[in-house]
């Protein structure tokens, strides 16, 4: 025989069950990784690129997140500015921006350093105006200064010891970057 449960206990269990189902079906927190081939994962599988690895690490820590890989091989900061509204969904909480070096590779369409930095500032400014937290992947002091100006985080998302072609990260390099990003993103998620 089953013991008789009081109405309060039954109500408590049912409420907890309903809450659990609502939490399980809750909309994930969106994180977008915006950039070029370094984000996209040139030379590795999409599942090996750091956005996918970061999502797996965050989920293993109990975060209900979806990390969207908005990396496009060969993209420039001008291209990122043009497409950011179409690849960053409303409600996105965090965007990881990795400008890369494609702005300087084309003799015909190359940008000056000032134009490159102006584009990065426009990207960060638009994101911060939408209350999106930003992690700027960059190694330069000018980029770090831009990040500070907009209350964003600036950090290195490179690892020169793990490259597939002398320029792009291999799967281990992507894992190292994801591990570096993990505590930064966790802190951002905790303060939202």
Image: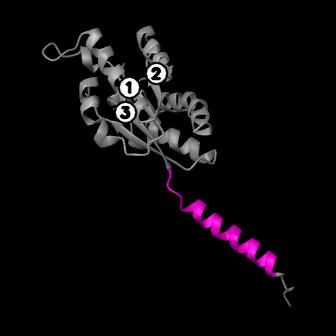
Question: Mark 2 — residue?
Answer: 150
Task: Count residues near mark 2 (Cα–Cα under 10 Å), then give few for <14, some for 14-19, many for 20+.
Answer: some
Disc 1 + disc 2, Cβ < 8 Å: yes
Is residue 117 visible to us here?
yes
Crowdedness of circle 1 by 10 Å Cα count: few (<14), some, many (20+)?
some
Quarter of the image containing the C terminus? top right
Query: Seen in the image, is 172 located left or right of residue 40?
Result: right
Residue drawn where x is 19% and y is 15% of the image: 110
Which sits earlier in the primary sequence, circle 2 or circle 3? 3
Where residue 134 appears, x then y in whole percent?
46, 29
Marked residue nearer the N-terminal end (3 or 1): 3
Instruction: Give the residues drawn in magenta, as a range.
Output: 7-28
Q: Does residue 19 appear left or right of residue 99 in this picture?
A: right
Secondary structure at badge 2 equals loop
Residue beneath disc 3: 34
Badge 3 density bin: few <14, some 14–19, many ≥20, Cα 10 Å? many
Q: Nearer the viewer, mark 2 or mark 3?
A: 2
Q: Distance between the residues labelled 1 and 2?
A: 7 Å
State the residue in front, 112 or 50.
112
Name the quarter where the N terminus is drawn.
Answer: bottom right
Q: Residue 125 carries which label?
A: 1
The residue lying at 58 percent from left, 29 percent from top is: 184
């Amino acid at each position: 025989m089953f013991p008789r449960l009081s109405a309060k206990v039954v109500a408590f269990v049912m409420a907890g069950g309903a809450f659990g189902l609502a939490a399980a079906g809750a909309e994930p927190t969106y994180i977008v990784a915006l950039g070029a081939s370094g984000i996209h994962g040139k030379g590795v599988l999409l599942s090996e690129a750091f956005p996918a690895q970061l999502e797996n690490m965050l989920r293993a820590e109990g975060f209900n997140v979806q990390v969207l890989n908005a990396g496009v091989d060969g993209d420039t900061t001008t291209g990122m500015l043009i497409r950011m509204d179409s690849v960053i969904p409303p409600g996105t909480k965090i965007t990881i921006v990795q400008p890369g070096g494609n702005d300087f590779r084309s003799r015909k369409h190359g940008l000056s350093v000032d134009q490159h930095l102006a584009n990065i500032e426009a990207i960060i400014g638009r994101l911060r105006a939408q209350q999106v937290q930003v992690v700027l992947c960059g190694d330069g002091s000018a980029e770090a200064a831009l990040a500070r100006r907009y209350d964003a985080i600036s950090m290195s998302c490179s690892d020169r010891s793990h490259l597939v072609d002398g320029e792009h990260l291999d799967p281990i390099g992507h894992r190292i970057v994801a591990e570096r990003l993990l505590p930064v993103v966790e802190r951002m998620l905790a303060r939202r």
